[in-house]
């Protein structure tokens, strides 16, 4: 059996839409999530613009965090590194957040 992986997808819309300095701060912040024990991988980046109507490219930053299971996701959410990032960077900069969680 393949190990189970839970993928946590976070899409962020900045209060100051298109601000590349703020986007870079969130991308750098996401790298710190790799120091959380339950996190397998965390990465972030900006949207790829598309002419295709099916593609939503309106967000400023996309974040992916992979953990093993729901317990690992809760450990990530509760971890001081994540809480500090949320309070000090995400909440001040982000107007809207959309989250998708799925497992394989």
Image: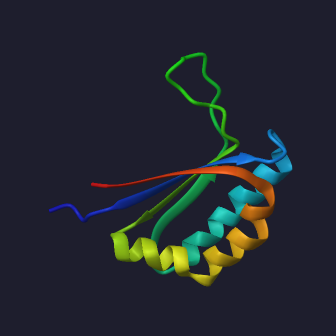
Question: Where in the figure is residue 65, as x and y percent of width and height?
Answer: 50, 61
Q: In this orientation, which residue lies closer to the viewer: 22 or 96?
A: 96
Q: Is residue 6 above or below residue 81?
A: above
Comparing 102 with 23, the one in front is: 102
Left or right relative to 5: residue 16:
right
Q: Residue furthest front?
A: 96
Above-or-below relation of 21 to 78 = above
Residue 87 sits in quarter: bottom right
Residue 68, by quadrant, is bottom left
Q: What is the x, y in percent for residue 81? A: 64, 79
At 70% across and 77% down in the image, what residue appears? Answer: 84
Tell whether 64 sits left or right of 96.
left
Total residue callouts: 0
Q: Residue 59 in the image: x percent, y percent?
A: 66, 39
Q: Residue furthest left?
A: 1
Quarter of the figure that contains the N terminus: bottom left
Name the image quarter holding the C terminus. Answer: bottom left
Q: What residue is at 65 percent from the left and 26 percent from the top?
A: 49
Q: Residue at 64% x, 37% y: name it.
A: 47
Check the image and tell me how it is coloured.
rainbow
As drawn, 75 above or below 50: below
**Image x and y of residue 73, in percent:** 43, 71
């Amino acid at each position: 059996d393949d190990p189970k992986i839970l993928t946590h997808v976070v899409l962020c819309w900045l209060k100051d839409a298109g601000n590349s300095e703020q986007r870079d701060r969130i991308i750098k912040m996401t790298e710190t999530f790799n120091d959380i024990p339950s996190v397998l991988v965390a990465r972030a980046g900006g949207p790829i613009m598309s002419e295709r109507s099916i593609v939503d490219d309106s967000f400023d930053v996309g974040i992916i965090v992979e953990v093993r299971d729901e317990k690992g996701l809760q450990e990530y959410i509760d971890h001081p590194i994540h809480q500090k990032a949320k309070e000090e960077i995400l909440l001040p900069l982000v107007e809207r957040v959309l989250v998708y969680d799925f497992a394989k």
